[in-house]
Image (cartoon, rainbow, N blue to C red):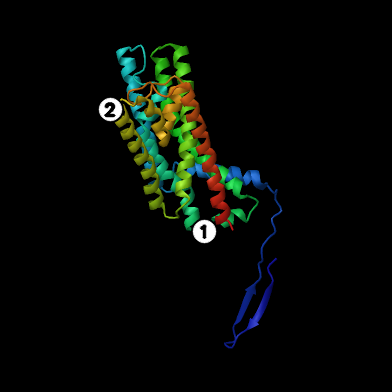
Amino acid sequence: MAVEHPLATPSGDQTRIHNIGYRNYDGPRLGRSYATRSLYSQSLRGSYGLGRSVKSKVLPMLLFVVMCVPAAIMVAVAVATKAKDLPVDYTRYAIIMQAVISLYVASQAPQSVSRDLRFKTVPLYFSRPIETADYVRAKYAALASALFILTAAPLLVLYVGALLAKLDFADQTKGFAQGLVSVALLSLLFAGIGLVIASVTPRRGFGIAAVIAVMTISYGAVSTLQAIADAQNSTSAVPWIGLFSPVTLIDGVQSAFLGATSAFPGTAGPSNGEGLVYVLVVLGLIAASYGLLMRRYRKVGL
């Protein structure tokens, strides 16, 4: 209840001071799990600009459309020409569209973490029940989920179109499942790399430039070295060179174990033994990304 205290002033007027105070919170204490889920959902929504300004929605929604439109065109062509198969395998689609995926990671990884660093709000998160591991898991899971939506949606378009075109149900279902496994692995790897790079700087522009540089330069360099090795008849070196780029890592894993056609020059892709090395490197990079994020935010939260 407000308490009024009359206060005399030299002018003879009376001024009232209202001591309204603050009401204690008597509702349920939802704890860490609820806070982590809330951070995850808000970060996932933010990855597509939902709940933010119209300007924030333009780029992620545009990239989503760019990812899906080629798939829709392929389906239309397959239906119109009564083709016996789709023009592109499910496992190849993300590799073909890797430039769009890299641009999405570059734009949304800094959006997810750089603003918290810039405005120094990370310690405020940790002042509540949420802990460092909860924050990192929520941000990592949110960006990986956003990437999975981006990369799985066109595969779903291809799959539905293939069924409408009355292509073989078993073959299309198997290919669709293999494609989902591939893009799930890609989403985890790309999200980890993007967040680690973005967490280094509070400046969003620097984060975007750094992510683009790492994704594009590594792929360009690896592709060039593979072409040189193939031209010099060193085809045995081609699979090992592919270990040094995120895109070619995913390409190697799906070529070895998911029946995909490899884009590596002069070779059908890694063998099963080499593919096992690819899997270990991918899993190691995912684990290392998580560990580096944990280490980074332990320091930031102090």
Residue drawn at point x = 49 percent, y = 31 percent: 185
CB atoms of marks 2 and 1 within 8 Å: no
Q: Between 141 and 222, which is closer to the camera in this rendering?
A: 222
Location of the C terminus by quadrant is bottom right
Q: Residues within 10 Å of mark 1 (few under 14, many from 20)?
A: few
The span from disc 2 to disc 1 (Cα, nearest Å) is 52 Å
Residue drawn at point x = 42 percent, y = 41 percent: 105
The x and y percentages for residue 212 are 37, 43
Q: Is residue 95 found left or right of 296 in the rendered image?
A: left
Name the amino acid, label 1: Lys
Q: Between 180 and 64, which is closer to the camera in this rendering?
A: 180
The x and y percentages for residue 178 are 47, 22
The x and y percentages for residue 290 are 54, 43
Q: Is residue 132 found left or right of 223 in the rendered image?
A: right
Determine which residue is flagged by label 1: 120
Determine which residue is flagged by label 2: 231
Residue drawn at point x = 61 percent, y = 54 percent: 126
Q: Splitting the image into 4 quarters, where does residue 224 fall? A: top left
Name the amino acid, label 2: Ala
Q: Between 187 and 167, which is closer to the camera in this rendering?
A: 187
